[in-house]
């Protein structure tokens, strides 16, 4: 069955989008939430487990105080109220990767409530209200063997790794975000980006989306423009990159818009996001949702963070990312628009690191924003996952500055590095890429002028606009190795 | 080996070992021999840990551990997790599971030199009052083999009453230590909730479960209580406070000037005459020893049973979810084609008994969306009211007393098909679990049917010592520590 899609902007001309974002963050505590097992990523399966995180009969949880402190810090950084008294609750459902067949979470008594996070998109500020920040334990990880692409359907058997079971997980839930209009997808991405930076600055998580330490569920509904009654929402699960957050919103806007236009209703359901196609497909229907039978966790005493602790933590909060970024922009001479573009494209840190590696601020920004983001999109990966290091970008930029590479050649070098051909200098050497010398250039210019005598005549008549096609021909003839400025000078000189 | 060794109290046993009149190994062997002789009749033990017992006894004899109970054998309820020793909680679903760790109280008992003989029979997951819900067959009451030794901890009570061990460990969620003690003429204490670590106690109802001592004398129970009690950082609900002076209180036994409240609601219809008579005599005895006896009304105790049968099954429905065949224990239906969900369902259908399934269904229902407030939520309110009844009562009295159970030991088979009749066995014991305060059953003689009657003492939270003071006074006045000498049919 193919899904009919509307055009994003067209849909949003007629419907108002309502966003909701649920973000799960694995905390960077040394030990798990309810036992002393290590939380280190990447250990061999089932080597970081004990009776408690395996849910063995008779075992009991004891709350990790560092996890409480981290959660309070997150709440404070998001301008939340911190509960004076709250409880953990059990969320009951059967699943093989959940050792106790219930998850210790928080239900109607979260640790932090009623906060907000401000983001800027296209120069416009949006306040995203935070409904709650709560603490829960992560589940184990199932690996389905024998089927296609690790999915449970068609698998011959499944393996479970409980190393992740019990790692502290903070869930940050927004209130419905309205009024974003056409910027819905960008606001969603900007929110997750901003949240990631806040969390990283707090030092509470390594916020690596590709390793799953930051995971996002995107809720979206549409209502007719001007309406007040919210439409039916879908929840797209495990959207695991910043780019995917934006794409998932775009896709759901387009899909739901087409349904509504066709007079169909949107089904309230969980949907899965597919990185390869940028589309979503239905998962479990929420309309036959499970009853989780929440009740207060009797194995744990209530949490009552002391006010002195909360105020003490408040005093340790780092300055917000916006302040840090403003200082960065100031030092490097970036404008507010530069900054917003870099932040929302997720390249601000990369630019900073490239500058630190020796490139100029303008070139660093130009490389990432002007070229590499586009390459990442073409290759369908996060820009941070491109197979090129900031040191390599800085080196290419340096060769460009010194005139050893033309801009065109420099981009070819970058592409070759990304394609895994080797380091910058090795790539240049193996391809024999170097800026064309004066003699070579003269030969090419003369040949181009001779090949197109009409244009050569126009140039002679003083029509400088006619130089372009000849420059193009020279570039082509030299395989991009010509310095375009010098070529232009030579063309004017040799045509007359 | 001297058969008389099994007739000694824990205090006497430890004294003989300490004085080198007998070795701990001889004591352990005497009990192992006794178990070999009569366990086939009583079905008190599900697993006998001969090697573990003798190894520990040798440590005592080598002087590696000492203490007031060093070398004393003990019968451990099979709901307490023991490293490398099978632990089933009386259920088929855990058959064959060998735990990789020890419960905190097991560690403490080992450090105290106590010799664990093996694991005792119980109603499956401690759900029952007769051991008839054990997946491994019922245990039998040494006083009358056709009768129940109580439940759920009937294996431990039968072992202690039948001289298979001088000490036992039980767990008490709604009366599972006290009711078996009452019907076997032994002493059993449910300590203050949080007084004894639950780490390694296989959960039935987390907010109610509490492990405690079983013994033939009040002082023996107090000594064991002192070994297992105290704060445990591995149990969040464990209370970080000094252990109440239970041993001193048991040695002292002076009740003069103590204010004793008789719970008005626990008398009358449904109470066997023989029970009522012995109970009233015991109250008179306490008055004679100088206690001020008054009648106290606890109006919400009448609702305790109903509240309990919502709270306990609700928690159980969640606590027992983990028995899903994925990690340990029984696995049924894993034919290579069945899904994980199908294997879970088949395993749970095959592995749980009828009573466990009944309670899982009750609890699942009570916690369901739309019913939570009416059932679980309402039951929690009743729990609060019962707690207030206790707190109000303890403004005017030091302890509350009642019969432990309305009747003496019932016959095996008599109530097994009538859950409500079975549940009534815990009518008087449940309030203390809901409140969290300590309570004890101490024998107060035999009913006219020749079976033991239990006298229940209930005290405020962390006043466990008061139980032992009253229990010791009664024991001395009635000679109930010699009651079990009448058990001669084994």
Image: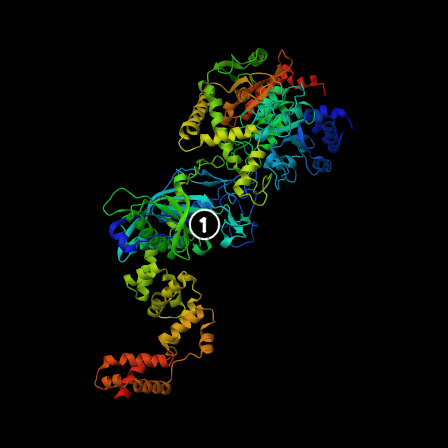
Residue A467 visible within the image: yes
Rendered position, A297 above or below B215: below
> Hey, which quadrant is residue B176 in on the image?
top right
List the residue tagged with mark 1.
A27
* Tag 1 secondary structure: loop
Residue B152: % across, % down: 59, 26
Scheme of image coloration? rainbow
> Hey, which quadrant is residue B63 in on the image?
top right
Q: Quadrant of the C terminus of chain B?
A: top right
Residue B49: % across, % down: 69, 35
Residue A318: % across, % down: 37, 53
* Residue A445 located left or right of residue B295: left
Give B401 or A43, whichever is nearer the viewer.
A43
Q: Residues within 10 Å of mark 1 (few under 14, many from 20)?
A: many
Rendered position, B98 above or below B365: below
Give A477 or B124, whichever is nearer the viewer.
A477
* Residue A183 located left or right of residue B418: left
Residue B260: % across, % down: 52, 17
Residue B69 visible within the image: no
Q: Quadrant of the N terminus of chain B?
A: top right
Rendered position, A208 above or below B201: below
> Hey, which quadrant is residue B35 in on the image?
top right
- The chain to which mark 1 is attached is A
């Amino acid at each position: 069955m193919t899904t009919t899609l509307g055009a994003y902007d067209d849909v949003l001309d007629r419907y108002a989008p309502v966003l909701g974002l649920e973000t799960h963050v694995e905390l960077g505590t040394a030990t798990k939430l309810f036992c002393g097992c290590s939380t280190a990523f990447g250990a061999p399966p089932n080597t970081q487990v004990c009776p408690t995180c395996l849910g063995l009969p008779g075992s009991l949880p004891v709350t990790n105080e560092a996890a409480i402190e981290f959660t309070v810090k997150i709440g404070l950084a998001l301008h939340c109220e911190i509960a004076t008294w709250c409880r953990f609750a059990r969320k009951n459902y059967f699943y093989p990767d959940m050792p106790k067949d219930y998850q210790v979470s928080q239900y109607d008594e979260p640790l932090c409530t009623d906060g907000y996070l401000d983001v800027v998109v296209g120069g416009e500020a949006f306040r995203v209200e935070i409904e709650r920040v709560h603490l829960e334990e992560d589940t184990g990880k199932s690996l389905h063997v024998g089927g296609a692409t690790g999915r449970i359907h068609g698998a011959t058997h499944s393996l479970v790794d409980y190393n992740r079971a019990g790692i502290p997980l903070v869930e940050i839930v927004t209130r419905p975000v309205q009024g974003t209009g056409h910027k819905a997808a960008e606001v969603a991405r900007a929110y997750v980006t901003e949240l990631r930076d806040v969390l990283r600055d707090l030092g509470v998580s390594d916020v690596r989306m590709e390793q799953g330490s930051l995971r996002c569920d995107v809720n979206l509904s549409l209502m007719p423009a001007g309406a007040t009654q919210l439409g039916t929402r879908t929840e797209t699960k495990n959207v695991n990159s910043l780019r995917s957050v934006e794409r998932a919103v775009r896709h759901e806007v387009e899909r739901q818009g087409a349904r509504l236009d066709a007079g169909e209703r949107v089904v309230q359901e969980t949907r899965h996001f597919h990185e390869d196609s940028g589309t979503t497909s239905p998962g479990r229907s929420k309309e036959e949702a499970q009853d989780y039978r929440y009740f207060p966790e009797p194995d744990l005493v209530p949490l009552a963070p002391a006010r002195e602790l909360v105020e003490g933590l408040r005093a340790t909060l780092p300055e917000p990312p916006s302040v840090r970024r403003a200082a960065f922009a100031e030092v490097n001479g970036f404008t507010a628009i530069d900054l917003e573009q870099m932040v929302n494209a997720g390249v601000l840190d990369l630019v900073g690191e490239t500058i630190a590696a020796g490139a100029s601020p303008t070139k660093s920004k130009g490389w990432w924003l002007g070229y590499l983001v586009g390459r990442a999109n073409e290759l369908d990966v996060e820009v941070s996952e491109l197979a090129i290091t900031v040191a390599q970008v800085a080196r290419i930029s340096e060769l460009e500055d010194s005139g050893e590479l033309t801009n065109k050649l420099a981009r070819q070098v970058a592409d070759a590095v990304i394609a895994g051909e080797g380091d910058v200098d090795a790539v240049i050497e193996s391809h024999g890429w170097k800026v064309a010398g004066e003699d070579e250039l003269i030969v090419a210019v003369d040949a181009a002028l001779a090949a197109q005598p009409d244009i050569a005549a126009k140039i002679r008549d003083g029509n400088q606009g006619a130089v372009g096609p000849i420059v193009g021909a020279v570039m082509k003839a030299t395989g991009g190795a010509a310095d375009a400025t010098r070529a232009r000078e030579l063309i004017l000189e040799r045509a007359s | 080996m001297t058969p008389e060794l099994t007739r000694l109290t824990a205090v006497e046993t430890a004294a003989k070992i300490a004085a080198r009149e007998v070795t701990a190994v001889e004591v352990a062997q005497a009990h192992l021999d006794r178990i070999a002789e009569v366990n086939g009749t009583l079905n008190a033990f599900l697993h006998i840990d001969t090697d573990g017992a003798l190894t520990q006894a040798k440590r005592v004899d080598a002087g590696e551990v000492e203490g007031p109970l060093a070398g004393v054998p003990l019968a451990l309820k099979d709901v307490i997790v023991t490293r490398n020793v099978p632990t089933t909680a009386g259920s088929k679903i855990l058959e064959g599971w060998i735990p990789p760790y020890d419960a905190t109280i097991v560690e403490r008992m080992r450090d105290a030199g106590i010799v664990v003989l093996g694991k005792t029979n119980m109603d499956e997951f401690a759900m029952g009052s007769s051991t008839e819900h054990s997946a491994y067959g019922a245990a039998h009451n040494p006083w009358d083999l056709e009768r129940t030794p109580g439940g759920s901890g009937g294996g431990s009570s039968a072992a202690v009453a039948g001289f298979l061990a001088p000490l036992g460990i039980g767990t008490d969620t709604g009366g599972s230590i006290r009711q078996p003690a009452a019907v076997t003429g032994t002493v059993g204490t449910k300590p203050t909730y949080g007084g004894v670590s639950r780490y390694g106690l296989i959960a039935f109802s987390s907010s109610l479960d509490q492990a405690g001592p079983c013994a033939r004398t009040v002082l023996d129970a107090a000594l064991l209580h002192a070994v297992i009690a105290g704060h445990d950082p591995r149990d969040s609900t464990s209370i970080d406070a000094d252990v109440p002076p239970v041993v001193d209180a048991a040695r002292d036994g002076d009740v003069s000037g103590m204010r004793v409240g008789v719970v008005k609601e626990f008398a009358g219809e449904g109470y066997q005459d023989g029970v009522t008579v012995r109970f009233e005599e015991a109250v008179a005895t306490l008055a004679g020893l100088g206690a001020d006896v008054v009648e106290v009304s606890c109006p919400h105790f009448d609702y305790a049973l109903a509240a309990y049968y919502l709270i306990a099954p609700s928690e159980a429905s969640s606590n027992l979810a983990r028995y899903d065949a994925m990690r340990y224990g029984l696995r049924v239906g894993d034919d290579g084609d069945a899904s994980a969900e199908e294997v879970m369902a088949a395993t749970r259908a095959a592995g749980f008994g009828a009573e466990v399934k009944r309670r899982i269904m009750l609890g699942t229902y009570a916690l369901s969306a739309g019913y939570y407030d009416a059932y679980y939520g309402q039951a929690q309110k009743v729990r609060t009211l019962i707690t207030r009844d206790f707190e109000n009562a303890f403004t005017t009295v030091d302890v509350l007393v009642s019969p432990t159970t309305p009747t003496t030991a019932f016959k095996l088979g008599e109530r097994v098909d009538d859950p409500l009749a079975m549940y009534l066995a815990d009518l008087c014991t449940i309030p203390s679990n809901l409140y969290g305060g300590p309570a004890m059953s101490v024998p107060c003689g035999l009913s006219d049917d020749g079976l033991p009657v239990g006298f229940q003492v209930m005290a405020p939270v962390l006043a466990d010592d008061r139980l032992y003071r009253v229990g010791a006074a009664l024991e001395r006045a009635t000679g109930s520590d010699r009651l079990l000498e009448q058990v001669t049919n084994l």
